[in-house]
Image (cartoon, rainbow, N blue to C red):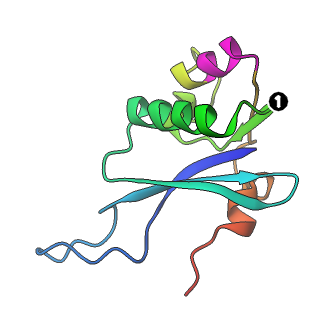
Amino acid sequence: MATGRALDASTVPAETDGKRQHVVEVLNTVDMGTSVLVEAQVRADFTAETTLAEIATLLRTHGCPQLLTFDRDVRLVSSPAGSDFPSALVRFCHCLGVAVRICDPHHPQQNDLVAYCTPSA
């Protein structure tokens, strides 16, 4: 299962001051074996804490996979390099016995989200 960066939702109307980007974000989860979208969780306030809570909800609903793959969003891995102290999400996964794979930097093709969950124009 791949859980990737929270992507901007392109269908959300602009705010009254004209701001459109980052009104809400979507945490897309894709089954890597079938490339099927498992869930798309929408929030206006994705932080490391709220992302962990949403992934905990996802795992309660769908069960624990053997492996979760993340991109290098700092809300998921704590630092872009991924080499510092592991994030709460990575430690949470390890406690549940779920292996974690963090995509290599500058290789978005390793993340199924890029290929299968791009917003349609």
Frontmost residue, 61 versus 38: 61
Identify which residue is drawn at 78% across, 33% down: 65
Closer to the camera, 117 or 39?
39
Say which quadrant the C terminus sits in.
bottom right
Residue 113: image x %, image y %? 68, 59
Q: Residue furthest bottom?
A: 121
Residue at the location (49% across, 30% down)? 52
Q: Name the residue under label 1.
A: 66
- When the figure is inspected, residue 4 is found, relative to residue 48, above or below; the finding is below
Residue 38: % across, % down: 67, 54
Q: At x 57% / y 75%, what residue is drawn?
A: 119
Predominant SS along the magenta part: helix
Above or below residue 89? Residue 69 is below
Q: Is residue 11 left or right of residue 112?
A: left
Secondary structure found at label 1: loop
* Left or right of residue 78, residue 94 in this image: right
Whether residue 78 appears in magenta in the rendering, the answer is no
In the image, residue 39 lies at what x, y percent? 60, 54
Camera-nearest residue between 99 and 78 = 99
What residue occupies the far left of the structure in this picture?
17
User: Which residue shows up at 80% across the image and 61% down it?
Assistant: 35
Foreground of the two, 94 or 34: 34
Q: Where, by quadrant of the figure, is residue 12 drawn?
A: bottom left
Q: In which quarter of the image is the N terminus?
A: top right
Which residues, given as a range, are shown in magenta? 90-97
Q: The residue under label 1 is which amino acid type?
A: Gln
The residue at the far right in this view is 33
